[in-house]
Amino acid sequence: MKKLLLALMMLWAGMTSQAQTIRVGHKFWDGYELYTVKEIRMGKYFYMTTRHDNELTLEKVDGKSGEYIIIPSRQAEECPFGAAFGWRVQHINQDGENFLAIRKPNGDAMWTMKLTTHDEEQCQYFQMMMLQEEPWNAVNGILLNRAYLAGSVSTKQQLRLLRNKILAYHGYRFQSEDLQEYFSTIAWYKPGNDNTAIKLNIIEQTNIQLIKSEEAERTEDVLGDEPYWETEEGVAECIREYFDAVNKTFAEGSDMNPFDLDKKYYSAYWNEVYDKVNKKESNATSAEQLFFVDDNHWTAGMEAPVEVKDIKVEFLSDNTAEAILTLVEIKHGFSQKVIITLEFEEAIWRISNWLEKSHDVSGSLLVEMEKYIGL
């Protein structure tokens, strides 16, 4: 990981131009598109566009070096980046970094646009490399963008921990008990006695602000001081999300049972799994016999959509949990209890082997279900 991080930092450096002012032909990469400065009028109005005809026009603020505001463009009906016309843009050339920071009214950077000498294809390649780097490793050393945060960090609570990791790296002494507890388990964290003595570089300052802006866009709740995914409520919500997705998939199949759905979304792998399930011995474990968890089948031996009436969660370890579910078949009202095992992976609780086995199998029922659970 250190080698990849070093390569990314070197590539960033190679993309940076040390220009002091914005000029015609300058290119700025925001993680999604490459903006090229097409025209500067009266030395005050800077017009740039992308190959997809998105536009950005900046007006220089008199008497303030590197300060601009966003103004309406020729064809743009709304302000880009989720910003608003009149918001401030700062051209930052500091600590070897050269970029535009779009700022909220409170001064926080909510979007970054990196000055580059590369074309869009090369920028996209860099972004792909960047997405391979773990946020935990990159956050203190690479200027991030919102595209990276959206693609690499799954939950609001993860964003909070990532933002505070920047401070923890410098020995920040946290007041929040959950942050104290979390970072106390990390070997390199050594809390100091004077938070005011901590000095952050421009990358760290901007990344903290970007992460805060990304957090503001996320809607999931955090319950109290405990990370949401570590609560019974968080686990239960993930389970219910799965069953909601199952029911929506059943609805697409016009009330067909799981085996008829299998025929509709046929795959050789699914058929192999179907045969394996039907050959199970009668003394199979409850989870396998009723829920078919390990074999990608849907409901607790039922042949119609079900709803979850009750969930009791018990944590077995930091990354595994067991849940006892009371399931009710929607059509006929039959109910039964099942036991499922869950594993924590990539910031979400997943039913063991339920999705992963046929994740890449084109046409399988699980692939159809993915659109309902955001994979």
Image: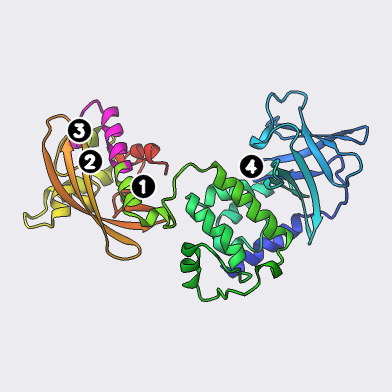
Give the residues drawn in magenta, as a range.
241-260
Q: CA distance from mark 3 to mark 1?
A: 20 Å
Callout 4 amino acid:
Tyr
Task: Look at mark 3 in the image and give the residue it sits on.
Answer: 260
Q: Residues within 10 Å of mark 4 (few under 14, many from 20)?
A: some
Q: Are the residues flagged by discs 4 and 3 in contact, CB closer than 8 Å?
A: no
Looking at the picture, how far across and down is residue 208, in whole percent? 63, 55
Q: Residue at x 44, y 46 (%)?
A: 221
Where is residue 256 shown, x and y percent of the image?
A: 20, 29
Kind of residue at badge 1: His
Asked whether the residues under the numbered discs 4 and 2 touch, taking CB atoms below 8 Å apart as contact, a structural biologist would say: no
Mark toward the start of the polypeptide (2 vs 3): 3
Q: CA distance from mark 4 to mark 2?
A: 40 Å
Q: Main SS of the magenta segment?
A: helix
Residue 32 image label: 4
Question: Crowdedness of circle 3 by 10 Å Cα count: few (<14), some, many (20+)?
Answer: few
Q: So how many labels did they put on this image?
A: 4
Q: Secondary structure at mark 3?
A: helix
Foreground: disc 4 or disc 3? 4
From this view, report whether residue 353 is shown above or below residue 370: below
Which mark sits nearer the N-terminus, 1 or 2?
A: 2
Alpha carbon distance from label 1 to label 4: 26 Å
State the residue position of label 1.
359
Residue at image coords 17%, 53% = 287
